[in-house]
Image (spheres, helix red, strand yellow):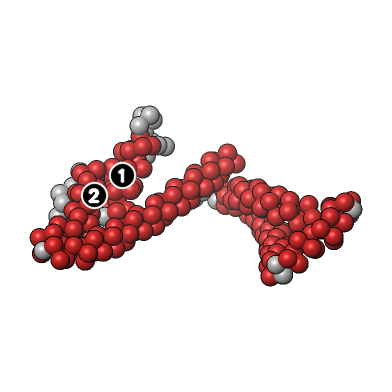
Amino acid sequence: MNIINNLLGKIIYFVAKSISFVLDSLIRLIVTIVIFIKSVSKGLLVLLSMGGCLFFIFFATWGLRILLDPMGLLIVMFFIVFPVLASIFVSKLKYFKYVVTEYLFNLSNYVTDKNKYTYKSINDYKTAYRKAEEEKIREEQRRQYEQQRQWQEQFFKQHWYQQGSQGNNGGYEGQRGYSLNPNAEFKSKYEKSCDVLGIPFNSEKSQIKLAYRKKAKENHPDLNKDPGATRRFQEITDAYEFLSDENIARYRNL
């Protein structure tokens, strides 16, 4: 019986590896074609834009002829529509590849050794993929938020520095009032982030991590069905992201 299970497990594993190889090759081929089409399109646009008035002359003559010709119109539509449809198709292929191959790999292990591995249905992998994609979106949102925050912070620094320099003739006190504003705003946000995590303002990084894990677990949308859990989870994540090593050092130097 063990021999049959081992053989069946190896067959399933081979099928999973074959599907993975075929889909990876197909995805790479489509991505390569999309990159090539986009490069050609950009090259043509740059070439035409460099011509200035020649662009309008070309469009008025050859451009209209191409658009009026069925084959020419089909080629133009291909260059426009194919990259969009290909991106959607690649996304679906990646989803299919992950769900099917991971399911088969798990099934192969389970068939080979049922005592060591736990069977998971294909729906479990669909859910896992969806959660991973949602986490990618949240991570991208956090990254964009951090970039925006850094930009705003830099902008205010430059703004108050310029204002302070312009007001230097008005006395030291006026200049001092301008220079403190960015630090006051930073201090307020730092302490508010600490309050969100429920920790003292002088907490170490290890304390911050511990508090974040505890709060995140309590308010994770998958575990906490409270309607406000998602909002609180985002606030907790934003607070933790703000309490970076750099900002901890900056706060202590205020």
Q: Residue at x 36, y 58 (%)?
A: 151
Three-letter residue code for mark 2: Lys
When asked about the image quadrant of residue 17, the answer is: bottom right
Residue 178 image point, x, y percent: 18, 58
The residue nearer to you, when weighing 214 against 85, is 85
Where 53 sits versus 68, above or below?
A: below
Q: Residue at x 76, y 67 (%)?
A: 54
Residue where numbered disc 2 is placed: 189
- Foreground disc of the pair 2, 1: 2
Task: Answer whether residue 231 is visible to the viewer in this image.
Answer: yes
Residue 175 image point, x, y percent: 15, 62
Three-letter residue code for mark 1: Ile
Left or right of residue 72, residue 32 in this image:
left
Residue 228 image point, x, y percent: 35, 32
Residue where numbered disc 1 is placed: 236
Quadrant in the picture for the C terminus: bottom left
